[in-house]
């Protein structure tokens, strides 16, 4: 029986410790609850603010990385295309020299076919040639090699000849046109 009495005593002690004790007389409970409620409301507002800022930062990060990824994909081939531009120039020079030859030469046709295929492929990747001759000199697009006397008054300050063609890749200059300006 003593064991049963000990167990009953333990249960009473446990229930007394787990039940909330109300030692207040009811006088201070309302202000304490109001101040606790105020603190919790302020903490909730602060947490919401932090959450919104964190969410906004994440959205900005997501947009920025997707934009950077698109730009990287657009300009990833820039180095390869820059390396191919001298080959394209050589094809254009070969075409100019073959124009003076008369007749239908298979080598001439082959060079023309290869040039057209290379040029169309580069165009599909976003390469565009610059049109410079007859236009005003622009430091952001052209590189001046020399100045020569202008053959007419209206060509002063304009591009008379193009030594090396300039190119755009997706509206970004990848090679400046090397030009001769009329003075």
Image (cartoon, grey):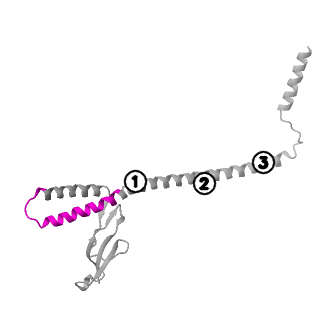
Which of marks 3 and 2 precedes in the sequence?
A: 3
Indicate left or right for 113 with 33 as reference.
left
* Mark 1 residue crowding within 10 angstroms, few (<14) / some (14–19) / many (20+): few
Residue with the mark numbered 2: 53
* Mark 3 residue crowding within 10 angstroms, few (<14) / some (14–19) / many (20+): few
Residue nearest the viewer, comparing 69 with 78: 78
Q: Are marks 3 and 1 in contact (CB under 8 Å)?
A: no
Q: Nearer the viewer, mark 3 or mark 1?
A: 1
Q: Position of residue 178 (x, y in %)?
A: 31, 72
What is the secondary structure assignment of the residue under circle 2? helix
Q: Residue lying furthest left in this view?
A: 103
Q: Nearer the viewer, mark 1 or mark 2?
A: 1
Q: Residue at x 20, y 55 (%)?
A: 114
> Above or below — where is 182 with respect to 131?
below
Rounded to the nearest angstrom, the CA distance separating label 1 from label 2 is 30 Å
Residue with the mark numbered 1: 73
Q: Residue at x 42, y 56 (%)?
A: 71
Q: In the picture, which quadrant includes the C terminus?
A: bottom left
Q: Nearer the viewer, mark 2 or mark 3?
A: 2
Which label number is shown at residue 36? 3
């Amino acid at each position: 029986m003593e064991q049963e009495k000990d167990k009953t005593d333990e249960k009473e002690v446990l229930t007394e410790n787990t039940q909330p004790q109300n030692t207040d007389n009811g006088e201070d409970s309302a202000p304490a609850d109001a101040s606790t409620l105020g603190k919790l409301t302020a903490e909730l507002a602060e947490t919401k603010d932090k959450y919104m800022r964190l969410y906004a930062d994440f959205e900005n990060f997501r947009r920025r990385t997707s934009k950077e990824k698109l730009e990287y994909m657009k300009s990833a081939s820039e180095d390869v295309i820059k390396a191919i531009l001298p080959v394209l120039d050589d094809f254009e020079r070969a075409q100019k020299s073959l124009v003076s030859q008369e007749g239908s030469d298979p080598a001439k046709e082959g060079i023309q076919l290869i040039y057209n295929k290379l040029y169309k492929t580069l165009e599909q990747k976003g390469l565009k040639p610059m049109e410079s001759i007859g236009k005003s000199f622009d430091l952001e697009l052209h590189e001046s090699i020399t100045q020569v006397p202008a053959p007419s008054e209206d060509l002063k300050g304009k591009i008379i000849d193009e030594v090396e063609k300039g190119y755009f890749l997706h509206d970004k200059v990848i090679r400046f046109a090397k030009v001769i300006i009329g003075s």
